[in-house]
Image (cartoon, rainbow, N blue to C red):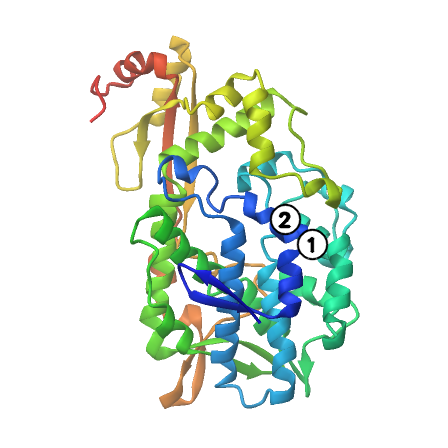
Amino acid sequence: MTQIRDPIHGSIAIDERERAVVDSPFFQRLRSVRQLGFADLAFPGASHTRYAHALGAAHLSGKIFDAICARLPALPEAERPRLRSALRVAVLLHDLGHAPFSHASESIMPQRARLALPLWATGGSSAGQANHEDFTLKLLLDSELTDLLRAAYRPLDLPPEAIGSLVAGVPGPGGPYFTVRGIDYGPLLRQVVSSELDADRMDYLLRDSFYTGVNYGNYDLDWLVGHLGAHVHDGVAELAVGNRAIFAFEDFLLSRYHMFLSVYYHRTPICFDRMLRLYYREAPGEFEIPSAPAAYLRCDDVQLLTVLRASKNRWAQRIANRHPFRLLIEANPYDTGYDLVEIVGRLERAGIEHFATESLGMVSKYFGESGATSTIWVHVPDQRRFVPLEEYTPLFRRYEREVRIARIYVDPALQREARELAGLPLEPV
């Protein structure tokens, strides 16, 4: 066992197999991909990486699995280490394909067809533009990392396809890999990898809150994890949360919601994100995301910043020198009296360069999600029943509508004229 010190979880233990994965260049690349992109321009401490987050999420997935198994007598003891290993390595690798500065760079990713992914991993279609999930699967299933995983996890009968199926959220080929004594534990494991109550979100909320210096992402981790279990029905196992922890779960959902509105959608990183997209649009080909795994190893924040500094493109120089457009107006759902369309029209007629952004926040996408294939259940032990989550808590209904934050940014040299045109005080309050 190797012990890693972490400011969020304390000591994180990884076994020899996981150590080999962590030491691989594909995982080490995540040291140079920041977790929150441009957020450190607003929150100076937010320079943490996806490398640290992946380690923390894998650690939490093991704790979640152990908590569930304490309430899962149907799963034989002999099978538990194998499923636990599969879950931990899947969560460890879930962010492997993130591009420089995360989601902004997905706009220039190659077409999915160029990755030549198996159809089972792409929902049966190779059409459209690739995203970071596609690149994660490419690295898992068709790179030198694939050979490492195949060798390391062969003794556990866990081929890369089995691990990839947990990351992709679908059953993999050649299985069933996670069926034990007629019960399919695949849905349960996939929910711990990605769902409304997964190890990924549990880690990044605490980690991002810590490094940004805000309190919005804090929630009762120990109580929530300690009340997780499984509902076995119709031959499948799915995630369940005890009814005594439902308020902790609601707090967890609201923590994520508030983090989006206050941190992830903060005006400064949103502005730089848009400027990066404008750079990609005005200087096509100057920075490209390669589809070959070996070349993708060099595709990180450092490489992109190097290109931006050397570029003559105006947006690249604004990003590199931290000269953003200035916020003219911001309208959250509680603001009234703004006609942003009219303001944009005035700016256009006056020839004032500007751009508009819209950020959408929701408590959850679980409720009414047409693509959902697994249910999270609430266990009511006194009544000996399991209730679908959306039927138990009204929180989904209460916050079902999207929350929009609309903004207009303008050329800082013309900010005073723009404020006058918009009917705003000449000096920002």
Amino acid type shown at disc 1: Leu
Which image quarter holds the C terminus?
A: top left
Residue 387: % across, % down: 44, 78
Quickly name the residue at label 1.
Answer: 137
Examine the rendered structure and indicate whether residue 150 appears above or below residue 406.
below
Examine the rendered structure and indicate whether residue 149 appears above or below residue 109.
below
- Left or right? Give the position of 414 relative to 385: left
Q: From the viewer's side, name the closer residue of 157 and 401.
A: 157
Residue 256: % across, % down: 39, 55
- Residue sitting farthest toward the front: 2
Secondary structure of the residue carrying numbered label 1: helix
Residue at left 41%, top 55%? 207
Quarter of the figure with residue 382: bottom left
Residue at left 54%, top 25%? 278
Callout 1: 10 Å neighbours few (<14), some, many (20+)?
A: many
Residue 306: % across, % down: 58, 28
Quickly name the residue at label 2.
Answer: 97
Q: CA distance from mark 2 to mark 1?
A: 8 Å
Callout 2: 10 Å neighbours few (<14), some, many (20+)?
A: many
Amino acid type shown at disc 2: Gly
- Left or right? Give the position of 35 relative to 402: right
Labelled pair 2, 1 in contact (Cβ < 8 Å): yes
Which image quarter holds the N terminus?
A: bottom right
Secondary structure of the residue carrying numbered label 2: loop
Q: From the viewer's side, name the closer residue of 4 and 174.
A: 4
Q: From the viewer's side, name the closer residue of 83 and 198.
A: 83
Examine the rendered structure and indicate whether residue 17 appears above or below residue 38.
below
Residue 304: % across, % down: 58, 32
Res. 169 in view: no
Mark 2 or 1, nearer chain start? 2
